[in-house]
Image (cartoon, rainbow, N blue to C red):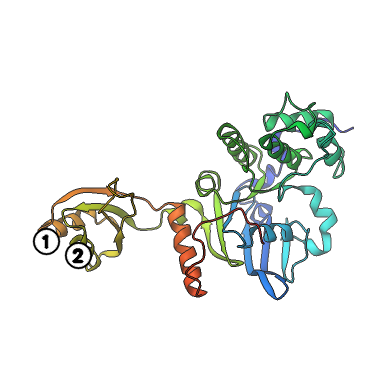
């Protein structure tokens, strides 16, 4: 039996200091990663770098390649080509040494239904390294199951099963936590609990978390950095805030003649883009124009509209959302592939 879990700051705490050489080493580095099934690429030349001490999100539609990528990163399937390094070491050569440093929940939790939650955690955690009863109880409490650990898993609700899966990923005190759709099946209080837990794992304990999700709002709230995957390739990656708040000002304009306002905006030299604002018929934004400007030029835009004889009743600042970015990238990918009828929204990945 091991001693109780050490203080949270243990995980890579000293190495996380600014300027320390080990902290510069990414926890995950994949180069040219590909996986082909029956001649069809599920992942196609994917590059991915996950910095130490961050929450990194993978976002994509059904079949985009998220889960396939995660399975390759965990050594569950072999890539057709490409390389993977974890903690600076080659996964292919040192898989058995590296995997105990990782906790994961991929493609849903699987437990023995006739055992209790506590027994399942002790059994599964012990396959990686010995875990004490204190470790097991701490993991249960972290996911809000501290008083339900002695109930049989078969009697758990869908949300409780999902939370036990997250507890199983944490019970052996890993440095890297990989969670595939972690809030699936959770009610709003449990979603908030998991979101706070993920942030605490990074901000207070120095761990690194890789999350895949189809919930755009949740990714935006939780992740420091993200990569958007389309057709097995990364089409956008970087800091979440920078991706959704680019170096441009966006305003929504409501004027007396939306058609004239749109045409005028498209002809102004300081306007990057202008398009009708999407809104329910008759609702806020109906008949409005969404305008992307080169810098803080809202005053110039208003003046140009008024001088053209238009009455401007509203000019509202609007930041780009992750949903807008995602759909724009999805449209670009569909057009490039000649597939305009492809579904526009992200999903929970079934095929890949």
Q: Do the residues labelled 2 and 1 touch (CB within 8 Å)?
A: yes
Residue 270, percent from left and from top: 25, 64
The quarter in which the C terminus is drawn is bottom right
Q: Can residue 293 be seen in this view?
A: no
161 sits left or right of 298 in the view: right
Q: Is residue 204 visible?
A: yes
Characterize the local packing of mark 1: few (<14), some (14-19) or many (20 or more) Cα atoms within 10 angstroms.
Answer: few
- Judging depth in this view, the residue of 281 and 209 nearest the camera is 281
- Residue at 53% from the left image edge and 45% from the top image edge: 218
Residue 110, percent from left and from top: 78, 44
Mark 2 vs mark 1: which is more N-terminal? 2
Residue 236, percent from left and from top: 52, 62
Which residue is denoted by mark 1 in the rendering? 308
- Judging depth in this view, the residue of 88 and 120 nearest the camera is 120
Q: Which residue lies furthest to the right in this view?
A: 1
Which residue is denoted by mark 2 in the rendering? 264
Q: In this view, does 266 lie above or below 76?
A: below
- Residue at 77% from the left image edge and 48% from the top image edge: 101
Q: In this view, does 20 lie above or below 4?
A: below
């Amino acid at each position: 039996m091991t001693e109780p879990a050490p203080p949270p700051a243990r995980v890579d705490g000293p190495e996380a200091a600014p300027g320390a050489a080990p902290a510069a080493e990414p926890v995950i580095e994949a180069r040219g990663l590909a996986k082909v099934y029956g001649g069809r690429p599920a992942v196609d030349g994917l590059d991915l770098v996950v910095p130490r001490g961050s929450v990194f999100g993978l976002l994509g539609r059904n079949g985009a390649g998220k889960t396939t990528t995660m399975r390759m990163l965990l050594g569950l399937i072999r890539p057709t080509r490409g390389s993977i390094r974890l903690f600076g070491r080659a996964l292919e050569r040192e898989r058995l040494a590296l995997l105990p440093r990782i906790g994961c929940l991929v493609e849903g939790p699987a437990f023995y239904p006739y055992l209790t939650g506590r027994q399942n955690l002790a059994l599964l955690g012990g396959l990686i390294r010995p875990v004490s009863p204190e470790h097991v109880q701490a993991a249960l409490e972290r996911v809000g199951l501290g008083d339900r650990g002695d109930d049989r898993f078969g009697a758990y609700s869908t949300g409780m099963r999902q939370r036990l899966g997250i507890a199983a990923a944490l019970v052996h005190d890993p440095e890297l936590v990989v969670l595939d759709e972690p809030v699936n099946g959770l009610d709003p209080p449990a979603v908030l609990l998991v979101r706070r837990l993920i942030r605490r794992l990074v901000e207070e304990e120095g761990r690194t978390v890789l999350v895949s999700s189809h919930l755009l709002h949740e990714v935006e709230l939780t992740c420091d950095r993200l990569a958007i995957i389309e057709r097995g390739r990364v089409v956008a990656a970087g800091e979440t805030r920078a991706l959704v708040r680019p170096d441009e000002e966006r305003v929504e304009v409501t004027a007396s003649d939306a058609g004239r306002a749109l045409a005028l905006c498209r002809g102004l030299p300081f306007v990057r883009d202008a398009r009708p604002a999407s809104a329910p018929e008759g609702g806020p934004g109906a008949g409005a124009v969404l305008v992307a400007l080169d810098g803080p030029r809202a005053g110039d835009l208003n003046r140009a509209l008024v001088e053209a004889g238009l009455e401007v009743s509203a000019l509202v600042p609007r930041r780009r959302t992750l949903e807008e970015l995602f759909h724009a990238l999805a449209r670009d990918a569909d057009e490039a592939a000649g597939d305009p009828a492809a579904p526009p929204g992200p999903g929970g990945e079934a095929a890949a």
